[in-house]
Image: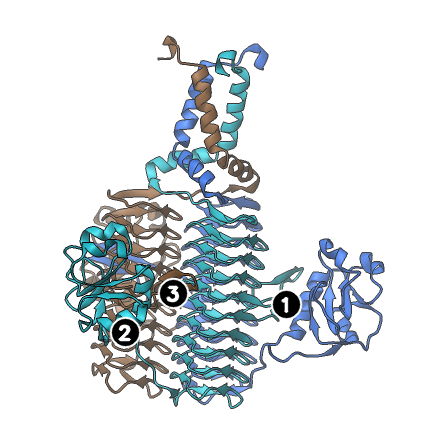
Chain colours: A cyan, B blue, C brown
Amino acid sequence: MTENRTWTLKQLADHIDARLEGDGECSINGLNTLQTAQSGELSFLANPAYRRYLADTQAAAVVLRENVADEYAGNKLIVDNPYLSYARLTALFDPAPRVTVGVHESAVVDPSAELASDVCIGANVTIGAGVIIGSGTQIGPGSQIGDHCQIGENSCLQANVTLYHGVSVGNRVTLHSGCVIGADGFGFAPSAEGWVKIHQVGGVVIGDDVEIGACTTVDRGALDDTVIGRGVIIDNQVQIAHNVQIGENTAIAGCTGIAGSTRIGRNCTIAGAVSIVGHLTIADGVHISVNTLVNKSISQAGSYSSGVVASPTKVWRRNAVRFGQLDQIAQRLSELERRVPPTDKDK
Amino acid sequence: MTENRTWTLKQLADHIDARLEGDGECSINGLNTLQTAQSGELSFLANPAYRRYLADTQAAAVVLRENVADEYAGNKLIVDNPYLSYARLTALFDPAPRVTVGVHESAVVDPSAELASDVCIGANVTIGAGVIIGSGTQIGPGSQIGDHCQIGENSCLQANVTLYHGVSVGNRVTLHSGCVIGADGFGFAPSAEGWVKIHQVGGVVIGDDVEIGACTTVDRGALDDTVIGRGVIIDNQVQIAHNVQIGENTAIAGCTGIAGSTRIGRNCTIAGAVSIVGHLTIADGVHISVNTLVNKSISQAGSYSSGVVASPTKVWRRNAVRFGQLDQIAQRLSELERRVPPTDKDK
Amino acid sequence: MTENRTWTLKQLADHIDARLEGDGECSINGLNTLQTAQSGELSFLANPAYRRYLADTQAAAVVLRENVADEYAGNKLIVDNPYLSYARLTALFDPAPRVTVGVHESAVVDPSAELASDVCIGANVTIGAGVIIGSGTQIGPGSQIGDHCQIGENSCLQANVTLYHGVSVGNRVTLHSGCVIGADGFGFAPSAEGWVKIHQVGGVVIGDDVEIGACTTVDRGALDDTVIGRGVIIDNQVQIAHNVQIGENTAIAGCTGIAGSTRIGRNCTIAGAVSIVGHLTIADGVHISVNTLVNKSISQAGSYSSGVVASPTKVWRRNAVRFGQLDQIAQRLSELERRVPPTDKDK
């Protein structure tokens, strides 16, 4: 692994606005779970199920809530939300390499591009005509930035990211390797001679504070733009088709696909391997569980599902055959109900 | 966004063989829907559902059918198939950057490669030994072309495309960023010491007029070639395994996977997130709907489905449990039918 | 296609420890199936279903089992396991280009990286600080190797592979194009201001003899490492989330997703388009069939399924509606059973 960093417990307490009890000069060089933390590492108790590990942890200090503080005799950082505090602390221990300000000599930058003075442009990057890149933004090696893209401040494109022309990326955005933003939406008109391509003349707009995972694809719009709202987080291998709109702070897990022109609300949580067909509207605050197929608009917040869960193949095989007989089963049941009407006793 | 182009209405009418009514000198600088078109933009009416927007559109002109032409007083282009005409017009308004003929100085081209004089080879491209690239073809920055690949005329490989060795690509083919053509098929023989790799000695052949989406993978064949027929269109994140054959003009939407040695017919439409197992034969003209699992060959044209659709999680949970009892339910039903045989009255 | 190689039948017999009957000097220049093999090609009979092709094959020689050797009069290589022998022979006929030892002049290698003297580093590769690469390993063009990665001996990273910082790769590992190893796991804590990123401070450890397919993603761990065991084979477009552990010799087919912290046993076979939710434990020797959703741990070896299979859409539509009535159907059935209790005759 790579370099770690060391902080005093007092510094960490200040970073997360925690109440410190114990030795503020205690030196902390990493984070770990209660069970695996070693001397010098900080741990945290967020989920009550792990409370039983508190007594025996080897951690140098623990982040926890007031109501369990008495159960732990060592150094502690008392906070309202240990999980959130842990998230904030991880930024201080991230071993990701610090990049060097400047443009690598192997990068190919069009003379018309406007780069802030403190950007970090990696090796073998290509930056097209008219591109604008804001202060503090880094572009990893092998990434290709098409003409007239705009990228805000303090954003990070990892290695081998591809932006087609005319893509707009906000501030503090992270795009992971292999993701492709702005490829053509899948639009073709049938004709006697085969499919005729509908050139996709819209763009893609990605709001501030968005994170997009590795090998995720976000297509450009047919006429208007595809829009990823502020604060949206998207996992790996997700497919966002043309003219989709994703509302602010919505989260989308891996392997999910969203077809063209569908609008997803704000604060939704969409689990992995979900399929959402095109031209739907999904309300704010909707949760869709893993492997669900959504083929109708959803107008009410709440949780929706359709996944069929695993059983031993021998059992599944019998039930799967019956699935193909379901309508017949229902009709046979109705027929029986007609033959055996409820008596007074049954009412 | 990037540069647009401007045409007279007469030029556009000629491009799509339309009958022009109105001002042929009217200047058109973009395309848009009836509802959102602004002055200077051309719109179209293909779907009757949008007829109600015709009266109030701000468009400078509208592409429409003869039978609705009377309902619109402004400039019009009258055609038989407005959607197809719209598709043909999009090519004139595509803001995608024009590329410069030539080989970028940072590209690494093997001396044995044969490139037509008017190709466009982007920055940081690698072109292997014995590669042949036809006239008018462009290779986007960061793309890697393996030894002995052949690419036809007027094809476009976008940025960060990967072709392994010995891949054959036709004319007028578009390959989007992140797609990988010719990686090894997933073939291994079990042995007492673990999996033994079956080296994939076949290739990949991609016909003319094919389009393949971003992050889509098409594996090379085990012994023979994997074949993508002429005019096939494939969306993003699709997986095509070794020795699959896709018939002409078939369309495949995003996130679909097709396992090894399956043959798909011509003029099929396969929706998103479909799974087709290996060694099947799918007839011409088959439609497979979203999220369907195909585990048997299909010999008749028509539409096939298996997706289970979303319901509120509370409702789903009860039904999902019953899915696991389906065989038992069917058996209990048969038992009841035995106990309550139909009477003469029931017949 | 690319260059082939030629061997004598005797050389091939030695390579797979076969008993040779016939002309050991016979020259073999390729492999093919019994039906398609031409003069000069070697074929094999592994699956008894193909026995009927034995008499008429044009192959120059056939690899087969002792018990069918009498049925074939031509040159033969007699072995215990023809399929495994065929796999071993494919290595001799692989047309993949031999790479040249050395570091391409366009590669950007950090001075602190330690490369064995016989590595092959392709064009436009970037190799970060502190990277260690073992003897005989090749890195394809356009690949990006983050700081402090370690790659063992005789491994092969194809073109356009991305390793984030601190990834550890074993010996004899193959990583296919477009795969991304070590991107951030999808970890965020909710807060009043939106999602707060949990920096992923763990790494990824990939054992010896692993193969990972094109556009597959393996995320780095949150605190501990994500671990891919020795001998694991993974197909294209697979998503392996943070802190997943995959046991030795497990095989995972395309388009499958495994969510965070799940542990998969050894010698499992996971078919395509499977979804496995997070924090589960799957035993050794489990087979999961195509399109299955696994939402509970599996403690027994065996085969598990949940896929729903295709039927004509008209039939499916009726059954799909009934799926939404399943609980009601089951309740109505119970009610009927109550009304019509079994008689003595029924028992």
| Residue B269 x %, y % | 56, 54
Are there few (<14), some (14-19), or many (20+) residues within 10 Å of tag 2?
many
State whether residue A280 is above or below residue B345.
below
| Residue B110 x %, y % | 40, 84
Choose between A222 and B211: the one closer to the eye. A222
Label 1 or label 2, whichever comes before in sequence order: 2
* Quadrant in the picture for residue A90: bottom left
User: Rounded to the nearest whole Å, what is the CA distance between mark 1 and mark 3?
Assistant: 34 Å
The amino acid type found where label 2 is placed reads Pro
State whether residue A67 is above or below residue A149.
above
State whether residue B71 is above or below residue A212.
above
* Quadrant in the picture for residue C203: bottom left
The amino acid type found where label 3 is placed reads Val
- Chain to which the residue tagged by mark 3 belongs: C
| Residue C259 x %, y % | 34, 55
Q: Is there CB contact under 8 Å for labels 1 and 3?
A: no
Residue, x 30% and y 60% (percent of image)? Answer: A82
